[in-house]
Amino acid sequence: QVQLVESGGGMVQAGGSLRLSCAASGSIASINTMGWYRQAPGRQREVIATITSRDSTNYADSVQGRFTISRNNAKNMVYLQMNSLKSEDTAVYYCNFAYQDLIRRTLDYWGQGTQVTVSS
């Protein structure tokens, strides 16, 4: 089992910045992918950024160039620096931890979510 706890959400004006953090604890597989997803009201949850345990990153087009994902493997932490925030970035942001087990099943875990509200 893996437990994830997010922090850092809040309210910010358009153009501002926020930094989200996610702490992972429990049975942490050394090879894994951590990521940030978000879900706005009335919309499906979408992936916005992922980072592997080897620091390979991917971003959704909507946040490319504005958001930066990073991780600290020693502390089992993942971060999301969000700059130039827009009203459409308003959503609940979720941390995700995914890995493959010994029979190559993909298992993933979710945090409880943190609200980000961007006012225009």
Image: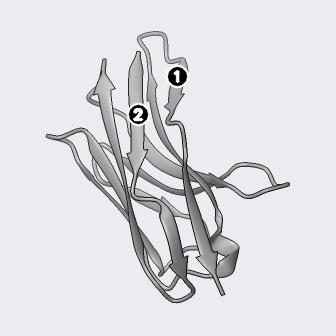
Residue at image position (39%, 22%) is 2
> Does residue 48 sit above or below 118 in this rendering?
above
Q: Quadrant of the N terminus?
A: top left
Query: What is the spatial separation of the Cα atoms under label 1 and label 2, in whole angstroms?
Result: 14 Å
For mark 1, what is the residue? Answer: 107
Q: Position of residue 112 (x, y in %)?
A: 53, 37
Q: How is the image coloured?
A: one colour
Q: Amino acid at mark 1?
A: Leu
The disc placed on residue 1 is: none
Disc 1 and disc 2 in contact, CB within 8 angstroms: no
Q: Position of residue 31 (x, y in %)?
A: 31, 32
Front: mark 1 or 2: 2
Residue at image position (39%, 58%) is 8
Q: Quadrant of the C terminus?
A: bottom right
> Does residue 52 sit above or below 24 in this rendering?
below
Relative to 92, 103 lies left or right: left
Q: Quadrant of the rendered structure where residue 85 is? A: bottom right
> Does residue 87 sit above or below 116 in this rendering?
below
Q: How many marks?
A: 2
- Tag 2, which secondary structure? strand
The disc placed on residue 4 is: 2
> Does residue 73 sit above or below 55 in this rendering?
above
Residue at image position (71%, 49%) is 45
Q: Position of residue 78 (x, y in %)?
A: 33, 49
